Image (spheres, rainbow, N blue to C red):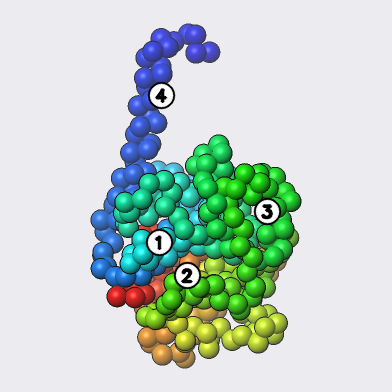
Amino acid sequence: MIEKYNKPFFLGILALALQIASASVSARAASIATNTQSQQCGVELVTLGVGQDGGAPHIGRLDDPAWANIDLTLWPTSLALIDHRADKRYLFETTPEITRQLHLLHQLAPTQRSGLAIDGVFLTHAHIGHYTGLMFFGREAAGARSIPVHVMPRFANYLRTNGPWEQLVRLQNVSLVEMASRRPERLAPDITVTPLRVPHRDEYSETVGFLIETDGADALFIPDIDSWDAWKRNDDVAIEELVSKVDYAFLDATFYDDNELPGRDMSEIPHPRVVDMMERFADLPDAVRHGIKFIHFNHTNPIRYRQSEETRNVLARGYGIARAGERFCLID
């Protein structure tokens, strides 16, 4: 019990430990910012996380090397769209690590505005790594005021009718904006965001990806999908055609192959495998393949490690692997 120890000394040690932990996270964010080439650009995308929902180090995995090496940490997948011309910033996904991800965003793209300085949020679906960061907008944390949250209709109904999310709506911490598949949402005269329905587990909401179009470069963001073939059958959309029309395609790369989860039938987890996608896109031009950026890695996926054989294979075949803190200029 604490009474056995000198309380001031004990509390001092505890405070020091917390300061060290906080400093380590800040140092990692600063390292990402320092090692990322800054681009002077009017509108850009920034990757704030590239991991699957649970991130890494992963819960219950004491052998995860990220416990000992903070540089191996994976934050769940999130992008930021920044319009420097109007000092506007939009998030794609609000993850459980949103506090640290916003800190990274502030380091990479400082703003003179106070508070969250977020002008809108776009959410793909209601799985934990993609939307639960909304909780930090509430009265217990940021106490945000009417942040526009763009979601599909079923997702909007889920947020309005289930706690704790309904409190965010009722207290006007967020303002829900209902989207429709393939209907563009205009953020500026030269920027639109269009949701595209994709097949995935839809327990509480629809699932979408986003097409981000500008007068400069365009980007596609699909962090979760069950099958490219199912998408084509359902919506007559061929992923090969779509990635050929954009400059950057951030695509679901949850698993590298079928050998990552011993003892489990991986056919029950129907994400496209990286090895299969590399074959699928192999005949596309070099420039198109280079624009494909794999994202949303499970903690078991070896491409999370920069020096792995699998990472070298992906890069050698002309594809990209997204990393936190990377910047992609859309409009000069």
The Cα atoms of the two marked residues, 3 and 4, are separated by 38 Å
Which callout, 2 or 1, points at the residue further toward the start of the chain? 1
Mark identifier at residue 14: 4
Q: Position of residue 324 (x, y in %)?
A: 39, 59
Mark nearer the viewer, 3 or 4: 3
Which callout, 2 or 4, points at the residue further toward the start of the chain? 4
Residue in the picture at 45% in, 46% down? 99
The Cα atoms of the two marked residues, 2 and 1, are separated by 9 Å
Q: Can you say which quadrant of the picture contains the C terminus?
A: bottom left
Q: Amino acid at mark 3?
A: Leu
The Cα atoms of the two marked residues, 2 and 3, are separated by 23 Å
Q: Which residue is mark 3?
A: 159
Crowdedness of circle 4 by 10 Å Cα count: few (<14), some, many (20+)?
Answer: few
The Cα atoms of the two marked residues, 4 and 1, are separated by 39 Å
Position above or below: 57 against 288: above
CB under 8 Å between callouts 2 and 4?
Answer: no
Is residue 49 visible from the viewing direction of this image? no
Which callout, 4 or 1, points at the residue further toward the start of the chain? 4
